[in-house]
Image (cartoon, rainbow, N blue to C red):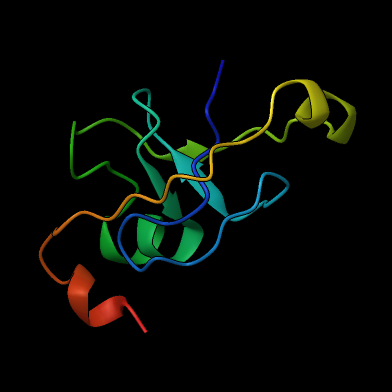
Amino acid sequence: MLILKPNCECCDRDLPPDSVEARICTYECTFCADCAAGHFSGTCPNCGGDLVRRPIRPANMLEKHPASTERALKDHPGCGARRG
């Protein structure tokens, strides 16, 4: 089951569980659509895999299986400048 990380690990943008802007790889590294496409050209900087749209967990399922609240940030080149 996906843990649904709450933020982009590059720019720290909030990515709530219902966000259509969240992108993930097979290891669930999480980025916003802007960083995924513009900064990483659709490739995960951690594993080299594709970054694709993260599925949305229905609200009634979030009650049973809530999203993670633990934020993750990585020091990829250029990410520090993207944090605002």
**Quarter residue 65 falls in:** top right
Q: Which quarter shows the C terminus?
A: bottom left
Q: Please tell me whether residue 14 is drawn above or below residue 41 in the rendered image.
A: below
Residue 83 lies, in percent from the top left, at 32, 77
Residue 39 lies, in percent from the top left, at 28, 64
Furthest residue toward right: 60
Left or right, 65 with respect to 69, comes to: right
Residue pictured at 33% horizontal, 49% vertical: 72
Left or right, 49 with respect to 68, comes to: left
Left or right, 75 with respect to 59, comes to: left
Residue 46 lies, in percent from the top left, at 18, 38
Furthest residue toward top: 1
In-front residue for pair 45/75: 75
Residue pictured at 15% horizontal, 72% vertical: 78
Furthest residue toward left: 77
Residue pictured at 54% horizontal, 49% vertical: 22
